[in-house]
Every structure is written in C-alpha cells, then in structure tokens.
Image (tube, rainbow, N blue to C red):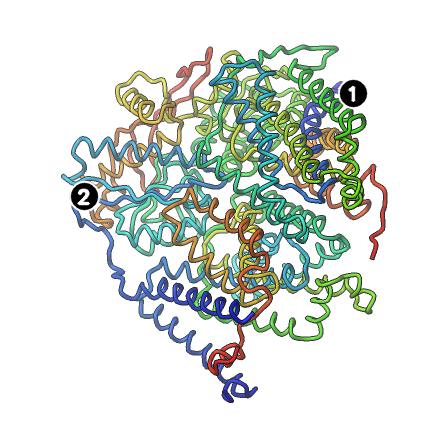
Amino acid sequence: MKIFNNKISQFIMRVLVLVLIFTIVQYLIASGSVSRFYEISLTSMCINVILAVSLSLINGFTGQLSLGHAGFMAVGAYVSVVLTNYYELPFIVGLLGGCLGAAIAGFIIGVPTLRLKGDYLAIATLGFGEIIRVLLQNIDYVGGPAGISGIAKMTNWAWLFGSVVLTIVVIQNIINSSYGRAIISIREDEIASEVMGVNTTNYKVLAFVVGAMFAGLAGGLYGHYFYIIKPETFNFLKSFDILVMVVLGGLGSTTGAIIAAVFITVLTAALQAYPAVRMIIYALILIIVMIYRPQGLMGNKEITMKTFGRIWSGRK
Amino acid sequence: MLELTQQLINGLSLGAIYALIALGYTMVYGIIKLINFAHGEIMMVGAYVGFFSISILGTHIIVAMLFAMIACAIFGVIIEKIAYRPLRSATRIAALITAIGVSLLLQYTTIFFLTPQQRIFPATAFVTQDYVVWGLSISNKDIFIFISAIILMIILQYIIRRTKTGKAMRAVSLDRDAAVLMGISVDRTISITFAIGSALAAAAGVMVGIYYNTINPLMGIIPGLKAFVAAVLGGIGIVPGAMVGGFLMGILETLVSGYGNSLYRDAVAFGVLILILIIKPTGLFGKNTGEKV
Amino acid sequence: MRLSRKVSVVVLTMFMLSILVGCGGNAEKDPGQEGSKTDGTIKIGINSELSGNVASYGTNARDGAMLAIETINASGGVLGQQLEAVVRDCKSLPDEAMSVSASLIDEGIVAQIGPLTSGNVAGSTPVMMESQVPLIAPAATADPITFDEKTNKVRDYIFRVCYSDSYQGTIMAAFATDNLEVKNVVIFKDASSDYGKGLADYFKEAFIEKGGKIIAEEGFVKGDRDFRATLTKIRGMNPDFIYVPGYYEEVAPLIKQARELGINVPIGGPDGWDSPDLVGVVGADNLNKTYFTNHYSVQDESPKVVEFVEAYKAKYNKDPDAFAALAYDSVYLLAQAITDAGEADPQKITEALAVVTDFEGVTGTMRIDDKHNPVKGVVILEHIDGKQVMNTRIQP
C-alpha cells in the first residue's frame, strides 16, 4: 500500500507512533494509575533494551563475543553519579559524562583485545569486566564495596524514552550505513573482509566504542533511578543477563534484541515469586535456544514499516 | 627468605589444585576447541559426591575420591552428549554460549536441590598433622594434595603417550577429519576425553573439600576461571602446559597476596590472562600456527 | 520461507500483546491497597537474598523469620489475626530489592522484614519511604541505613535490630585495648562487603584514638578460602592481635589456617562470626583465644534462647546462625509493634516501632533509639574448648 512505501510518509508514521506511545505512558504515569512496581519494571525494561541493543551491535552485527558489557555499564553509572552527586552538575552532563567514560573504557579495552579471535576475545572481555569490578571495589573515593548511596532520582519516563529512541535510531543508522556494511562483513568473514580493504581493527573498535557508550548511557540512567550503585551489581551475571537477551532475540537483529529484552524483563518480574527456578529457567532458555534455534527468535530479520506493508497487502 | 619459601610451599598446593582443573580445560579444548565453562561446576559436583560419600557412606577419603572421579566422568560424558555434541558443527561462539548456560544451570540446580549453604567436610575424613620443618609450616594435607596431583598427572601422561586411546585423542585434536579416515571413532574419543578431564576435576574438588573443609554450590566459579587462565598460560590444548600453568598460577597468586596487595589478587589473575593473550596467545608451550584461509 | 515468516509474525504479535496485557493490567489496579486486613490475615513481606552472593545468609534469615511467624501464629497470631508471610527474592541486588519492595507493597503488606545487607536495604528505602510502609532490617549494619547524613534526619520508616558498624567496631577496639591490652594490631577484613569495610574503619578510628597502632590492613574477598599467603605475611609482622571483620564462611578457614601457620595471638571479630559452622570448620583447639562481639550466645541457658534454638533445630535440622536469630527477633519486634499500635496499619506500626522501650528478643533486650537503632547490650564471647563462653557483657 502506498502509504507504507512512501519515504516521507514512513517517517511521519514513525514519528506519530513514537509520540503516541510516549504520551500514553506519560499520561498513565502522571495520573498515578501506574503502581510503583510497574514503573520500576518499565524502567528496567528500557534500560535492558538499551543494553541489549548496544550489545547486539558488538555481538550480533560485528560477531565479536563480548562478555564484559556490565563493566561498561558500571563505568557509565559511576562516572555519571560522581558528576551529579559529588560535583553537583546537572543530569544531562552526568549522562554525557557517563557515555564518554564508557566510550573511553571501550576504547581502552577494545584496542588490545580486538586482535584476538572468538573464544579468546570472549574470555578477555570477561576478564576486563571483572577487573573493572575489582577496581571499583577498591577505590575508596567511590565508596569501595559499599558503593554510592542516596542518589537522587533523576531518571524519569521522558529520559528513558528519549534514550531508548536515541539508541535504536543511532545504532540502526550505523547498521544501515557503509560502516554497518563493513561491520557485517567482518562478522561474515573477517579475512575476506580484510582482503577487500576493510580496516577490520578500526571497525571493530568503532563497534566496541559505540556499544560501550550506550551501555554507559544505560548505566547512568540506572544509577539515577535505583538510589544506590555498588560494584557487585555489575558482575558477570549481569553481563550474562544481557547476553541471554541478545542471543534469544537473534544475533544480528535489533528488533530481536528489543523484543527479547522486553520479554526477559517481563519474565523476571513474573518469576519474582519463584526465586529458586528463575536462573534455572534462564540457563535452560539459553541452552535450548542455542541447540535448537541458534539464530534466535528473529535471526537477522527486522520488523520495519515494510513488514507492516507486506502484511497489510497480503504479500509475503 | 624463610617467608619466601613458605609462600612457595603455600603456592604449590594451591597450584596443584589449579593444575588438575586446568588439565580438564586443556584436554577438552585441544580436542573440540571448546572452552568448557562448566568445568568448574564439574569440580563442584565432584566435591559434593566426595562429601556425601564420606558423610553418608562413611568411606575412606581415597574411596570417596574414586567415587567422585567415576561419578563425574559419567556426568561429563552425559553433558557432552546432551549439550555439546549437537553443536559440534555450529560456530564456536554458539558452543561457548551453551557452555556458559550449562555452567549456570549446574550451579543453580545444585542450589535448588542442596540449598546454598556450605557443607563441612567431616574432620575425621582426613586427620591433619602439622609439621614444622626448618621453620616452615607444612601439613600432611599439603603433601597429600601435591603427591596425589603428581600421581594423577603421571597417569594422564601415560594414558596420552602410551595407550591407543591416548593416540586417538592426540589424532583427533590434531586433525579430526584425518582421524575419521583412519578409522578412529571420534565420538568415543571425545567422550573419553571428557570423562578423563572430568575425573581430574572431581579429584581436585575432593581435595578442595579436604583442604578448605567447606564446599558450596558456587565454589567452582573462581577456581574454574583461574584454572582456565592457567591452561591458557601454559598453552591451551597442551597437557604439560596446563600442569606448569597451574603451578605457576598458584605461586603467582600467593606471591601477589604475600608481597603485593591481596585485594587485587583476582584482578591480577585476569591481567595475566589478558597479557598472555596479547603477547603470546598460544601460551608458554604453544607453537604459532597461522590460520589457513 | 513464507510459513516461518508468518509464524514469527504471529509469535511477535503474541509477545507484544502479552506485554501490553502485563503492563496494561495495572490500570484497573487499586493503588491504595496498603495495610490489607482482608481475609483476616496480616501480611508481612519478607524481602531476602535467596539467590546471588549472600544467598546462604539470606535463606537462613528467611528461615528464622518464617519460624517466628509460625510460632506466633500457633499461639493465636497478632490482634487475633494470623500473620501471612509473602516471601520474595531480591537476588542480592539493590535494584531488585526496590522492585520486590514495590511488589510486596502492592500485595498489601503492613511491613517488610529484610533485606539482609546494607546495600540492598538502601535499594528498598526510597519505595518504603514513598509508600510510608516500615522496614525492619535484621542485619544491615551500615550507619547511614537509618540516618540520612545529607539531611541530618532519621529515616522515618527504616528500623534495625542489629548493631551499627560504629557501635560494634568501637566496642571491639575498647575490648582489645582495655581487656586484652594489645598495642599492635593487624586488620584482616572482608574487603568485598560494606560490613567488613565499615567495621574496619570504625575499629581503626577507635583503636588509634585509644593509643593503639594498626600495623597493617589486609583484605580478602567473599568466596576466598585460601588465606595462607596473606597470613604468612601477617605472621612476619608479629602483631599482638588480629581483627577479622567478616562473615563466618570466610572467617572459619581463615582462623584455621592462621593457627596451622603458627599464629597463636588472639583473634577478634564481629557478629558475622556467629554460626555453628565456626567450630565445625576450625576445630575446638584452634578456636581458643578468639573473641567476638555478639548479641547473645546460642549456648545461652535462658529459656528464650533455648526455646528458639530447639524450635529452629526441630524445623530445619541444624543450629541457627546470627542472621536467623536476628530475623526471628525482627518478626517478634514487629508483632509487638502491631500489638502496641492496636491496628495493623503501616503508619501506626511505624509510630509504635519508633518508641519501643522494652522488647525482649532472643538477641537481647532492647529499646529503639531516636536514630531507629536498637539500644541493647553487647556480649563479648570467647571460645574455650569449642564452647562460647561469655567474657564480658556491656550494657548500654
């Protein structure tokens, strides 16, 4: 149908849908009909979406298995909280600082490790994630193991929504650009890509830095909602949680990452009354998905306006 | 000087345990190029089997260790069949992710059935005798662990170098397709490799139980990671490398705690890993093979 | 190809619908459902670390609390109503603790017991304060938990039944100088928890003030079992006394290895040591000349303690540790406050809690002070031949 295929009307449709979602939820929250529990879950959901999409860029599109994503989140959280709580700077400065800090961490970690392949890279990133955690635990300035507490709540629906949209838009645009094609070519066959003249190291570092940056954004939002940050929170299990989302959604699909992030957040909230089995279920999900459907839910397909167009017109 | 020697002794028994676990990692990696994340958990299962053997069945410590080794050998083979065999032709990342899943599954299933509380190894299982030799403190536990580890490693070397099974293992890790052409049953060889590696980890688990007296469901995580670093340090896929790497890691960790700052001990272990991977990824004993296109 | 595309579209739509249902269902929910007295039960939330880093302690705390609830119910409940426990797992994470508190409040609890560690209590705090529902922390020891240093005000809805770090650390420092008369001390702390760090800091401050000297400060992390390297180093420093603020899972092998290395000086610690596992792992001989500050002794002959220990053993087949005892007391304290308030209303319970003057718990007789901390005596227990013997009792 024409309305879905015209570029400008596509854009307008998208903006309309976004404004609609934002206003509805904002209204629900402001009018107090959303209980605190749902507000917390919604916040977690948005933060998870940002984390999953940013990790998806590194793991899914560039094919580099990074197991230390929680470390970048930690850097973002700590830097942003220090800026707002210790130096009394405004929230936006804190968030930007967090992003920058995480991006720098991504660069520092990326450059040496990206020469490694496959499993070695994975373990090296896991190691770096743990090193960040141990370092934070031993720096008294940021509270050591006790972390920083009493953080004022500055994250709200507007910030969350804006950040989610920003993340998705930026990352999708990277993927659909020539950078994206270079990145995907690295995933498909690194040696061939290098032979074709793609500077694989540069692009891998780019993906790493961008992914880290958004993880830092998520960390900043997290810190300013949940009142306290401690190094323990950003351990390997957190990285694992994000990994489950990306794998479940499909390594190579942004919409997959979004859907899986939402699904896992809902599942976590639903399983709150059954603590013993939650981790068992996650581990089983991971194993079963990897054995029976390793491409995840979406493979590398995306849901775009075109998909709706096809459904509408009955064409497949 | 006295203190240094004492620290070296401390490091050796710690290193023996890391070496035993590292051997399992390295053997599995050598043969199917998989980092078996769940290996630390196999050690934990071995510790629990040993614990129940001693506390419920009242067996002697050596018998308990044998039970643990047999149980974990079977367990390792089962895990390989269910979780890793279907992924043999998949990407290595897929297999690695599955291994992480298995690791967490084992931890949390154990917590579910056995509660997260620690269990205490009965003191009667192994009566400790502390000796002071030339001002150095050594206990009979240190000696037992060190000697048992050496014996197991000698047995392992014998199996690999002198038996047909060992030859098959070496062949499959060198070139799987050629091994198939030579009539070697790859599935069976891989299963045997898992069995042996798991048995060694189980022995390590029982030793940890004796030495530190307590076991808990999460005990496999950190030693597992450090043993992995040890395997990489020595050269992943190379058996003598794992042995040397294990002892080196034990001594290094002890020296860092003893002379540096004990708080950064874990960070140093990972730092070593990253340094090795950057400087010489094939490890101390490894050879550089280029990747064929 | 076509079929799988259709299938994924259907699956996706179902996902989105389920999400909408999950989120949209709240619109009909009545947010003002606090202090529910429906069905004739009083709902008490138990927000504990049942998985994650401190799961072994959190499950003990839950067990202690559940025992208390059952015992109270068996003798008629509170205000003629039965207590109903709503148990959730906060996974040893502060953000999850916040989420759990919110969901417990939605369920209509009148008060929350737990979480165990200070960080997780901090996570719950904003929600409890906003919804004006009280929280009793069984074992969170960081001073800022109940008192906001930034605004210099006590946190209205947060209470605790355990000592604060400043209290406990200072007492051990005084004991070391006055009773043990030691001058040179090494602190070997749990550097991975706020508990270890807080206690080490306060001990150090008080000890130096009394003229003592801290030769060195070493650390271990949760999960460690091998301390020989650092202990060898400490042995070389020749201290008179070693202060080990940490939890028993690490402290037990630590003490054992210290003795095996020939370190025979007195060793001291806080209530985190209190567990039947201590003597089980360390051995009676090695445990001689160790002291720790605690609320009570599990071997106390007084009827209250005996009753608790026997009941706990009967139900769980093991001896209780400090966390179980403190959680047990938290529930009884809450029950007393509800009775005092005359009504299971969160606001009234909070006001009753703030003025408790005479609560007799297993872990001591206490009153709640203006900073919502318990004012109760401390016992310093010494291990003699594997038994806990009271060395000193310090009254507030």
Q: Which residue is drawn at 53% across and 37% down?
A: C197
Mark number, residue B1: 1
Q: In which quarter of the image is the C terminus of chain B?
A: bottom right
In the image, residue C147 above or below residue B293: above
Residue type, mark 1 in image: Met
Outermost residue to the left: C80
Chain containing the residue with disc 1: B
Q: Quadrant of the N terminus of chain B?
A: top right
Going by the image, does C26 lie left or right of A282? Answer: left
In the image, residue C282 above or below residue A93: above
Residue A72, visible in the rendered structure: yes
Within-10-Å neighbours for mark 2: few <14, some 14–19, many 20+: some
Image spot of residue B21 (x, y percent): 67, 31
Going by the image, does C305 lie left or right of A138? Answer: left
Chain containing the residue with disc 2: C
In the image, residue B182 above or below residue C206: below
For marks 1 and 2, give the CA distance: 68 Å
Label 2: element kind: helix
Q: Which residue is drawn at 30% across and 44% down?
A: C86
Q: Residue at x 54, y 68 (%)?
A: A255
Image spot of residue C317 (x, y percent): 36, 23
The residue closer to the viewer here, C126 or A118, is A118
Going by the image, does C75 lie left or right of A81? Answer: left
Image spot of residue A163 (x, y percent): 52, 68
The residue closer to the viewer here, B21 or B250, is B21
Going by the image, does C282 lie left or right of A122? Answer: left
Residue A163, visible in the rendered structure: no
Q: Which residue bears the numbered disc 2?
A: C341
Residue type, mark 2 in image: Ala
